[in-house]
Image (cartoon, rainbow, N blue to C red):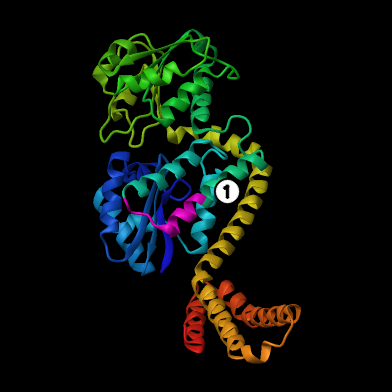
Amino acid sequence: MSVVVIGLEHSRAPFELLEQVVIPDAEIGKVLTALSAQENFREVAVVSTCLRTEIYAVVDRFHDAVDDVLSLLAERSGVSHDVLEEHQSVFFDRGVASHLFKVAAGIESAVPGESEVLGQVRRSMERAVDEGAIGPTLTNLFRAAVSAGRKVRTETGIARGTMSFSHAAVQLAQAQLESELECSKVIVLGAGDLGTGTLGALIDPRMKYRPKEVVLINRTRETAEEVVAGLTTDLNVRVASLEDLSRELAKARLLITAIETEAPEIHEADLSDEPLLILDLGMPRNVAPEIGQRGHVEVLDIGHLRAVVEQAREERRSEMTAAQAVVNEEVERYIEDQRGRGAAPIVVALREHLDTLREAELDRRATELAALRPSEREVVEAITRSLVAKIAHGPTVALKESAGTARGERLVEATQQLFDL
């Protein structure tokens, strides 16, 4: 069996392609079910963020798994198999751990060290657990990745300062509006992780410019009200219903959208003739394409964040090196732990077998040993236990070091035959 990850992410795939293959939260259960039903797949988990769609799996046949995943993504998105193959990222076995640990640490993020991704990795595991699609191999992998991500943020400065995707988006809006933002009304559409993070960045006292008023709109008004109730701020922050969007937009200067939707949520009919800056963080995009053609409306999306992202990446270059060093250490620790786990059953069986032989031989010689004093009997016990441990040491090391490899499988088979286990 092999552990693999197949997917598309921002460093290799264009934004438009990522937009097409994104798996909305409501569809993740269906994808997990579809792949789990295939004979080749033992365990499956999906990591789907605004700039990353990846399938993690434990499979019997590596190459078949790659083809199966690309075929599923092609069928869902309407993008050809060949195009997906051209932009895919594929890792297997040790490479999967290295990749996921870097993802959780924020090293692979568009904004280095961004805070949202760690929670997204954790929720990907939880969702796979809820769907019954994940087993011990991927569970251990994801838990170790989350632990590594936390350690990176504790021991390095990769997450210091403005580090989240939400903060980068608000920085972009501030660069466009500057001081005008301070006397403006801003609407945030969406109360999920990204929308909530954006709201938090807008009201952050450390930001150079903050809006006069912020309105949070969400499909479920109660969710938005819970978010606002949990805020501590001196700004005017309130909630409005989705039905009030057009009316609220009439006097807004900035609209930030961050909702999951299969079709655009914002159309020309929703807009007034007043100047409006729209920052579309949706994947797929939340704003109808024709809106960008209106002269008084400027539409920016995730693709326009590059300047802010490059600045953040340059500022964190040395910290990314330190973060990579921590990740390398954690990957080694994880691999060693997995080797031990993989070899454990046969190692335990070998040691138990040898100890059974030791005890049986002592029992057979019980009459000869009866004349020994208790202290002398203890010496015999200690010597025989030591001999068994030394005999088992070499096979134990070899089994642990080769666990999970073809050589390891051969050694397990040989150990079983040699010792009749």
Q: Position of residue 8 (x, y in %)?
A: 40, 51
The residue tagged with tag 1: helix, strand or loop? helix
Q: Nearer the viewer, residue 253 or 92?
A: 92
Answer above or below: position of 250 versus 381: above
Visible residue check, residue 273: no
Magenta segment's dominant SS is helix
Viewer-closest of 318 and 143: 143
Q: Quadrant of residue 207?
A: top right
- Which residue occupies the foreground of this view, 80 or 91? 91
Give the quarter of the image for residue 270.
Answer: top left
Horizontal arrangement in the rendering, residue 159 relative to residue 276 (left or right): right
Q: Which residue is mark 1?
A: 148
- Identify residue type, mark 1: Ala
266 is higher (above) or lower (below) than 143: above
Q: Position of residue 182 (x, y in %)?
A: 52, 10
- Considering the image in quadrants, where does the N terminus appear? bottom left
In the image: residue 380, left or right of residue 142:
right
The range drawn in magenta is 132-143
Q: Position of residue 45 (x, y in %)?
A: 38, 52
